[in-house]
């Protein structure tokens, strides 16, 4: 795998891992247990992808941490906005957030 493709894998797996962890936190806080169950399985897949990318990466440590940190930071940010949209759209129609 090329270093560029490895960087994409690191970024995407970090993004989705943190995105899904943040999303699941919100879901379970609001007692959306079935959705939390499904998202937990997706977290397992994202964590596997991240561990795989760590084990197989040939990217130097500093760029790896930068790419991973950026992916995770954007992941948690997107999770917050996604959940806000999801909650308004499907659960609190007309309520101010």
Image (tube, helix red, strand yellow):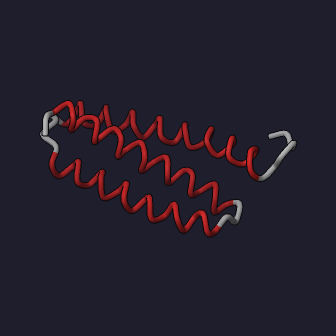
For image coordinates 61% across by 69% down, the residue present is 34
Tell me the quarter of the picture where residue 60 sits: top left
- How many numbered circles are shown? 0
**Residue 4's x, y, as percent?**
20, 30
Tell me which corner region of the image, top left, top right, bottom left or bottom right, holds residue 45.
bottom left
Residue 67: give x, y in percent of width and height.
Answer: 31, 33
Which residue is located at x 13 percent, y 40 percent?
Answer: 1
Tell whether 29 sits left or right of 19: right
Tell me the residue at 13%/34% (across/down).
2
Quarter of the figure with residue 44: bottom left
Q: Position of residue 84 (x, y in %)?
A: 69, 42
- Pick the quarter of the image with the C terminus: top right
Is the residue 47 above or below the residue 11 in the image? below
Residue 30 x, y percent position in the rendering: 71, 60
Q: Is residue 61 left or right of residue 50?
A: left
- Does residue 44 sit above or below 22 in this rendering? below
Instruction: Kindly identify the residue that appears in the image at 46 percent across and 37 percent down.
Output: 73
């Amino acid at each position: 795998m090329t270093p560029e493709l490895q960087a994409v894998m690191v970024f995407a797996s970090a993004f989705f891992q943190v995105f899904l962890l943040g999303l699941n936190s919100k879901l379970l806080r609001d007692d959306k247990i079935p959705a939390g169950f499904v998202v937990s399985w997706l977290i397992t897949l994202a964590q596997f992808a991240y561990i795989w990318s760590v084990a197989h990466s040939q990217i130097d440590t500093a760029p790896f941490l930068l790419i991973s940190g950026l992916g995770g930071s954007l992941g948690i940010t997107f999770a917050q906005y996604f959940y806000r949209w999801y909650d308004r759209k499907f659960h609190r129609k007309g309520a101010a957030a």
